[in-house]
Every structure is written in structure tokens, then in C-alpha cells.
Image (cartoon, helix red, strand yellow):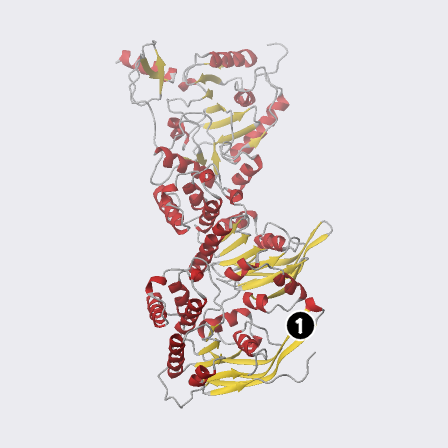
Amino acid sequence: MNGYNFAYLDEQTKRMVRRALLKAVAVPGHQVPFGSREMPLPYGWGTGGIQVTASILGPDDVLKVIDQGADDTTNAVSIRRFFARTAGVATTTRTVEASVIQSRHRIPETALREGQIVVYQVPLPEPLARLEPSRAAAREMHAMADYGLMHVKLYEDIARLGHVSISFDYPVMVNGRYLMAPSPIPAFDNPKLDMSPALHLFGAGREKRIYAVPPYTEVRSLAFDDHPFRLIRAPHACALCGARTSYLDEIVTDDQGGRMFVCSDTDYCAEQRGKRTAA
Amino acid sequence: MSRAALPPDEVGEMLLRVRGLGKSFTLHLQGGLRIPVLAGIALALHGGECVMLSGPSGIGKSTLVRSLYGNYRAQAGEILVRHAGAWVDLAASDPRTVLEIRRQTIGYVSQFLRVVPRVPTLEIVAEPARLAGSAPAEAAERARALLLRLNIPERLHVLPPATFSGGERQRVNLARGFAGGHPILLLDEPTASLDAENCAVVIDLVREAKARGAAILGIMHDAAARDAIADRLFPLTPLQDAA
Amino acid sequence: MSPDPLLSAPLLSARGLSVRLGRVAALDGVDVDLWPGEVLAVVGESGSGKTTLLNTLFGTQCPDRGVVRYRDPDGRVHDVHRMSRPMLRTLHRSDWGFVYQEPRQALRMAVSAGGNVGERLMAPGINSAGARHYGRIREAAIAWLREVEIDPTRIDDLPRTFSGGMLQRLQIARTLVTHPRLVFMDEPTGGLDVSVQARLLDLIRTLVARLRIAVVLVTHDIAVARLLADRMLVMQAGRVVETGLTDQVLDDPQEPYTQLLVSSVLLA
């Protein structure tokens, strides 16, 4: 595409982002500030994720973009087309074929492998934001590894509701040191981060922060010994492929209360359906 | 803490020795007016004996007693106390040592009971014994017995003394002083607000304390009661020179 | 001096503390020693430097000159103002405590009473078993609410439903839950109604004696000092004017300023 650098961003910007990424990978879970650029889409639409993807993309990469697990939603389509036009890279909807996966709100069901990179779009990088309004105080907590306040929040949930009420962006301890917001992925996806063979990069464009979980890093969801972390998923099988272990979306089908549950990960669902017809 | 009862006429070892004690007050708010009260005081107190201070009102009897307790600061001299098997100069001791001496060795019945809000009478009376090392149950029982002896009925034991009459408060004070079982006991007008019956109880308590080997030093304006328990009088004389 | 079996080295020891705030010498060459289980009152009027002294001892105010030394439970001596920030922070939440005059400063008003009391147990560095055990934290919170005479059924209530006296007692529970050996108190009964004060003072007195907590208590109220403190420091214009046994300083004040202070107190 004429007038634009490979993957839209100029090389100096990419260098700046990569330096931030290297720092982030060196200190897993720690938020690294970066000079977030003006992008051709507003804040809140994935500018952080796009800048990270743009900085790491090479001509031989194969890019998959998902939004809520689906390749075919408006945003996923737009972002995939953006990179296809500005970088000319191959794109795919199949997890197993991708080298870079940009995602909003899900980690693919299909197991990741070494060499793959997942890039997350992050609205709020600070896990303590809602509990501690002062940025300075929150930074101090991270510096001192003083996360009692987050446990207080869990305690309050259990006292009030009998269980922790956090269903997405569930806070995790990374490498036993930093408290991290894993982006608004459902709590169901948290275990996929733990000792994952893939590299996970998180970009928050509006908040101007980058953080990372390198491969094979310990990632533990916060819990009490007597109230361990539970996987929460709708107790149904996917209406399309019959899967019982994938994360489900609830789709309202009519206005008489009719609904169906389908896999949120469209590629995974398609694969399962393919297996069924093959079987 | 208490020793074997001694024959009434035999005094035990020396427990308190005062040498060259001097005490004056400097009233800075009155232009630095200096009022000397005590000078060159020397006395010795032995286990099993009761010494009563005598002299006209205002001569410094109370000042001497308070100085011996460390409540007033002496300007000169020594107050040697037999404490934990050794001689300690209370006048030269740091505050923590003085507190230790008060806990273990010197008990004090003052003229006024400083009322602590909300603390029941029984607890107030049992406290010195507890601090001296008695088990709580034992201290409480001794407190209860003393209160009953001093005619404070059981139903009042759970109440704080804030609403008690002056006489009742003084009896609580006395119970507190005697319950501690200290080797040295200082009494400042112990029978001042008491009727004849309770006065007699106090006399008995002093005699019992003497019998167990305690050394008693006190002030009593009631000559009859004083003579009933004093083994000797220590007269204070007015100072020749005043500032 | 007679040997005392309970005698140990001071818990806290400060020498030559001097702090300049602008042109004013807020502290001028102050020495302080505090022994285990001892209650020390720092008394003075506004501007005497008593709050500055408290903050300097606590570590939040850096002195221009002088040193504050603290002996940890293992007997090691630390220079409070040379400790690393994480170490000081941990100290503040475990072996030390601070009771503020305004409980809302220390409490989290949007967190339940139980959460407030249990928070220090949930902090890192608390190695006791049950630090990450919800049930045990809740049990500890209930036990401490009882200690400070707050009805344990209010454990899930928000502090904004509590009265002033209750808030202060909640702050005390929150502070004592880690069994600190040393607690700093800044006018703990200031601003409370007299009847509420009496109850709070009694509670402090009982807890401090039973748990053998050393206390540095700043107050302008001499009656509070008399009730709670073994020893007293009288401060004026940044200097210690007089020091000694509480009852001795109050009943036989030696220095002009102390005499003025004591005689100025209105008797009910």
C-alpha cells in the first residue's frame, strides 16, 4: 500500500514498542509505559493490541484476529483486513496455522504451541484500578508486592456472595511477583496462561502500557486456600458441535426466551463439527 | 511474698532506710518562690514494726510519705529500699525501677482514690496483687475477702467506685493497699473518713500485716487509733530556715 | 540498680532528633527511650512538636539530625530511617501499629468491618498459617471485634454505619490483629464524646496491659496521660522540658512550663 510503512507504523515507533516489549518480557506481569501512537481508529477499539501486532509482524507471519473468540465479527474482520492491506501478510481463521493471534476477550480453545504469539487488547491494564483510585498508591503496591487489598476484595465477595464474583479480567499473580490484569478474557481462560508454551503480549493503547507473560511462566489466579479458583462455564453442550469443555456464548434466538449456547471460539467449533462429520 | 509471723515485740530486718532526705518545692508561677519542707530526714523501718509520723498539720508528713513512694521527687538524700534481695536507692532510680519497686515492694494507701471509669471495684482491689505476681483467681479472692471485711457488700464488688461515698471509696482504697501483700506499706490517713467499726478493722489489718513481717509507715490524726498500732512515733520538726 | 528479671534493652531508642519545618525547629535535640510493655505519653500544647516527634519515631518524618533505633523480635537493631521502604512498610503492618485520631484515615470506608480487621492478615510477608485462608481470617476478625467490644454480627457491615467511638475501636482492632509490640497513638480519643472517651480509654488500658504492648501516646489531655501512661515527656517548642514517672511529673512538676501546664487543667 503506497505511502505507508510495512504494518502502518514507522520503524522508529516499532523499535520503541519492541524495546517496551523486551522490558515487559524480562519482568513478567510488570506494566511498562510506552509512547502509544495515534492510530486510525479510536481508543477503546484495540489500538494497543494493534500497535503491538504491528511492531512484531514480519512478512512471513500468519495472522489470526478474533473478537470474543469469533473471526467474523466486525472488529476482527476490520483489523485483519487492516494488516492484510498494510503488511500484506497471510491471514487465517485457523488457530493451528497462525503465528500471531490478536485477540479481544478470549484465548483460543485449541492448545497453543511454542513459537506462537498471542496479542491481547487491554482496556484497563491496572488490576488495582477499581480498588485504589490513586495511581501513585497502586504503583507503590506493585513495587512493594503489597497486594493485600486485592485479597480484601476477594474476601468481601465471599462474605457477601459466598463466592468470588469476578467473571472476567480475573487478577493473576505472574511468576510469583506481579499482580496482573489478564485483559477481559473470561476467568475460564486464565488457566491457559499458566505454563503456556506461547508468548503472551498485552497492549493498552489509551492507558499507554505494555506487559507480557513469557512462555512457561507460572500464572496463578488469586484465591483463598479454602475458596480455590473455580472454572465457570455454562453447563451445556455447544448446540452446533456438541463440545462440553469449551467456553460458550449464550445467543438469544427469539423473544419468547428461546436461547442456544454455542462455542465462543468459532475456529474451534468449526473444527469440532468437521470432526463430527468425518466421524 | 509474706513471711512467717513474728512475735509481736520482735522486729525483723531493716527494709527501708532514709538518709539525709531533703525536699523543697519551687513555685515558678509565684516568681520562683522556694518552700523547703524536709531537710536532713533520717529514719529506718524494719519488718514487723509500725512507725507513725507525728507533728502539726502542714509540717510535711504527707510530703515525706509521697517522697518515699516516688510520687514526689527528693532534692537531696537517699531512700534505700530492700527490693528483690538488694538495696536500691529509690530517690536515684529511673522511672521503670520505681514502678518495679511499687509493684513488688512498696504499697501505698493514699488519701484519695483515683477513680478509673468503668473498672469494677473487685478488679481495682485485685490489681496490685496480680501485678505483684499472684494468680488472678487468688488475687480476686483476697480482694473479695478484704472488701467484705471492710464492709463493702458483695453486690457492690462488680460496680465501679465512681458512685460510692467518700467513706466507701476510702475503704476500697484500703482494701487495694492491703491486698497487695507488699513488704512495705505506706498509709496516708487510712481512717480519715471511717466510722469506729471500720476503723477497728483497719487496726486489725495493720496488726496482721505487722505479724506477717511487713513494715508500716503512716500518718494518722486519730491519736487513739494511732497509738493502738504504732510501735513508735517519728516526729517531724519545723525547719529553722525558710526561703 | 537492682537486677530486674524483666529488664531488657529498650524497644525503641532515639537520640538527638532534630527536625526543621521551614524556619521553625519542630524538634530540637530530643532523646527518647521506650521499653517493652511501657506506655509513654508525650504531652504538650499545639506547636510543641509532639506530633512531629511521633511521626519521626514512626519513620514517616525524616529528621535532619539524629537517629531512631528499633530492636526487632530477634534482637537485631535497625536504624528506622535507613531501612528500605519495603522493610519499613512491612514493619508498619506487622510489629508496629499506628492509631490515628481520625479513624477514617486508617479504615477503608467501603470495605466491611471484617475486611478492615482482616486486611493486615492478608498482606504479603505474613507467614502465619492461614494468611490465605478465608475461614481463619474471618475467625480472627470476629475474635478481634469481640475484643474491642463491637458486636461480631456487624462483621459484614460497612464502617459508614458505625458511630465515632465504634470506628475508633474498629481501627484499634485493625491495628492489633497482627499482635504488634509497639503502637503509636495520636490523640486516640480526640474528638469523641466524653462518655465514649471513657470507654475507649478503658479498652486501650486493658488491651495494652494484657497484650504487653509498648505505646507512644501523643495527647494534649493530661487526664489521658495520667490514666494510660507509665512515663511522660512534656514538650514545649520542640524540646523535652521534663520527663519522668507520670504521677511524679503531674503531682510534683519541677519545671516552670510543666507547672504551668498542670495548673492550667480545669478540674471537673
Residue B22 picture location, percent across and down: 61, 80
Residue A235 picture location, percent across and down: 29, 22
Residue C144 picture location, percent across and down: 40, 49
Q: Which residue is mark 1?
A: B26
Residue closest to the far bottom: B9
Q: Residue at x 48, y 33 (%)?
A: A180
> How many residues crowd mark 1 within 10 Å: few (<14), some (14–19), many (20+)?
some
SS class of the residue under badge 1?
Answer: strand
Residue A161 picture location, percent across and down: 36, 32
Q: Nearer the viewer, residue C158 or B162?
A: B162
Name the quarter where the N terminus of chain B is drawn. Answer: bottom left
Residue closest to the far front: B195
Rendered position, A92 above or below C132: above
Q: Nearer the viewer, residue B162 or C131?
A: B162
Rendered position, C44 above or below A123: below
The chain under label 1 reads B
